[in-house]
Image: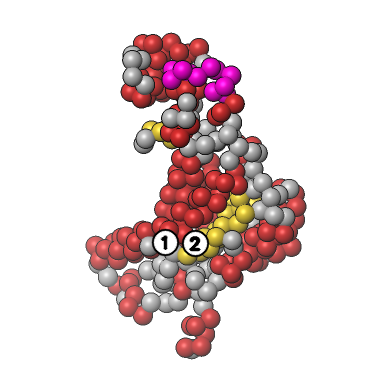
Amino acid sequence: MDKKKLTLPPTEVVDPDGREFDRLPVSEQLRRLLASQASAIDMVQKISHPIALAVEAAAERLRGGEGRLVYAGAGCSIRIGVQDGVELVPTFGWPMSRIAYLIAGGSRALSVSVEGAEDDASAATREVDNCSVSDLDVVIGITASGNTRFTCQILESSIARGALTIGVSSNPRGRLIEIADHPLVTATGSEVLAGSTRLGAGTAQKALLNCFSTALMTQLGRVLGNEMLCVRATNAKLKDRQARILAGQIDGIGEERAYQLLSQLNWDLRKGLLVASGWVEDEATMALAGERPFRELLSSR
């Protein structure tokens, strides 16, 4: 029994202190569940340095090009990855053409379980080929156990094509961690419900990806201060917000003038900030294509 335990991913090991979980009062069940969530966040905080290195490497790979963020995985892990990826479009204006998902079992696996999909390494190879993963791309493999065959094969095949790879796992001894260029391990340990990785491991994955993608988008010039520069101004509220940001960042520009300028620039706030700072519009367009941190760009003229 002890030998078997040593071979199990930490998320699969049964915590002996939880054997009576179902007998506990609801308030105590909730206390334990919430404590595990808080612990998962702590585990992410402990690896802030390797996350920062992964952000910097990803920004360097993606900056000023056509490379994509590619999220890969199975089950709960890829559902969390997709949730992170889809939010980059409305929040940061990241082009949909620069996001891809490699999902064990295909898109229907986002809502239903596809039997055996996570073990299909040959399908992973085909997915990488069909997606035309290249050295322009950053591939993020996500698996709580660290040993999911589909996800590990995605990273191996992506490395063979020259992509930068990031591995997100809760198992410090998992195969994914050995493969990835940037292994990110959140040691969340046993789950309150043994093997239910939507709990502690899932929370750690979500928090890690939230932080990673936000810092990455900041490095790629889509944030100034703590304000989002690329939210699409699709309604009056968002247009007013953009005008307030421009007026607040550039001395001598009132909100009314900011509104007029942004309307002339098709509500491109980043371009508006540069033009209001004295840039010629064509020069601003070219400079923005380089995807440098925006404050660095703003102060370079």
The residue lying at 37 percent from left, 21 percent from top is 250
Cα–Cα gap, marks 1 and 2: 7 Å
- The answer to which of 103 and 227 lies nearer the viewer is 227
Q: Does label 1 or label 2 sit earlier along the sequence?
A: 1
Q: Is residue 90 magenta?
A: no
* Left or right relative to 269: residue 182: right
The boundaries of the magenta stretch are 275-285
Q: Secondary structure at mark 1?
A: loop
Q: Quadrant of residue 199?
A: bottom left
> What amino acid does circle 1 point to?
Ile
Please give the count of numbered marks on the rendered protein: 2
Residue 210 horizontal/vertical position (percent): 44, 48
Q: Which residue is mark 1?
A: 47
Q: Which mark is residue 184?
A: 2
Residue 71 horizontal/vertical position (percent): 58, 51
Image marks 1 and 2: residues in contact by CB distance under 8 Å: yes
Q: Is residue 49 visible?
A: yes
The residue lying at 50 percent from left, 12 percent from top is 264
- Label 2 environment density (alpha carbons within 10 Å; few <14, some 14–19, many ≥20): many
Q: Secondary structure at mark 2?
A: strand
Most common secondary structure along the magenta stretch: helix
- Label 1 environment density (alpha carbons within 10 Å; few <14, some 14–19, many ≥20): some
* Left or right relative to 17: residue 172: right
